[in-house]
Amino acid sequence: MQQRELGRTHRNVSAIGLGTWQLGADWGSVDEADALAVLDAAYEAGVDFFDTADVYGDGRSEQLIGTWLKANPDAGVTVATKMGRRVEQLPENYNLDAFRAWNDRSRKNLGVDTLDLVQLHCPPTPVYSTDAIYDALDTMVDEGRMANYGVSVETVDEALTAIARPNVATVQIIINAFRHKPLDTVLPAAREAGVGIIARVPLASGLLTNRYTLQTEFAKDDHRNFNRDGSSFDVGETFSGVDYATGLEAASEFAKLAAAEAPEASSAQVALAWLAAQDGVSTIIPGARNAQQARANAAAGSLQISEGFNASVRALYDAKLREQIHPRW
């Protein structure tokens, strides 16, 4: 597995990481044994970066990782968590006292004294521009509660605002074959500033696996069922904000390109390899509901992507998706 420096954390992490939203909630149920098997399989395949959040299953995802860390004390895995989405989304709810309380809970869930990386979890837009927020985060680092901090964002403008701050180590943002705007704006700015980029939703909520149809039924507690209109959280988190039927058409076209590029690999693996190859991406965090998926995702780290394929993906985006993406993203 290729190792890359994760921005201003100066930690080396695997190019393919693991997102653990699935282990907490909103993707259908995953029992504890399966969740721990996912973590085992990812680690054994070379993954040493786990991303979680205090809101995933109201702490369940963090607790499962904490259980795994206790059983694997010498693993050397970097764990990034996120905070802020368990309260009403008002800028005034983001303050040092709240940060300390949220941090205490995450440290307890994960069973560690110092968190490797804490990210603000897509807070209200004014938060990214508030000096007092960064002062509070700096204080948390000085107190030894966390080693580094970053932000998770919904928009390019939010990312650029955070990148300009001197102690922001990482920015987490949606990038995939169906979401290209950050490639042109965020990645160059991050490279220049030395900020790490964590690419989330790398498979467009599964669309890029090319396994779904108009008849596919998602579980009632799966966000791909209940959040297509953005009624529960930002619609960009579900299928990257692309209309489902349009996404299915584009996924079929992508699969044809992927099969020609790497006949031995799945459409999902090629999509992950394509994203990992983008200049400035530090790590990507596909999720997995079982060990087989975790191993398959990690294997994408060894695929090589040609410039011709990169151009074909861009052409597909321009033809099928550019006009579908809301200017906000």
Image: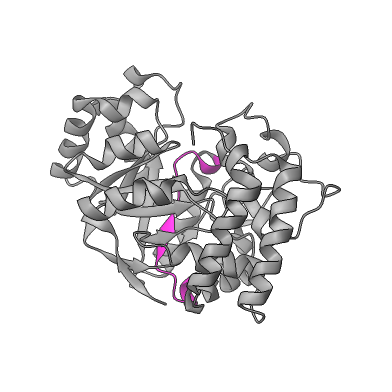
Query: Who's the residue at 35% across and 20% down the image?
Result: 91
From the viewer's perspective, is 169 left or right of 79?
A: left
Residue 309, image x, y percentages: 55, 69
Is residue 90 left or right of 57 when viewed as pictured? left
Residue at the spot 59% in from the left edge and 69% down from the top edge: 269
Q: Is residue 56 magenta?
A: yes
Whether residue 310 is situated above or below residue 149 in the rendered picture: below
Q: Quadrant of residue 112?
A: bottom left
Q: Position of residue 197 (x, y in %)?
A: 35, 53
Q: Position of residue 105 (x, y in %)?
A: 37, 39
Residue closest to the eye, 47 or 87: 47
Hey, which residue is sitting farthest bottom in the picture? 264
From what the image shows, is residue 224 above or below residue 43? above
Q: Is residue 295 magenta?
A: no
**Residue at the image point whose x is 63% and y is 67% from the top:** 293
Q: Quadrant of the N terminus?
A: bottom left
Q: Residue furthest right?
A: 215
Point 67% across, 53% down: residue: 207
Q: Identify whether 319 is placed above or below 304.
A: above
Q: Which residues are drawn in magenta?
A: 43-57
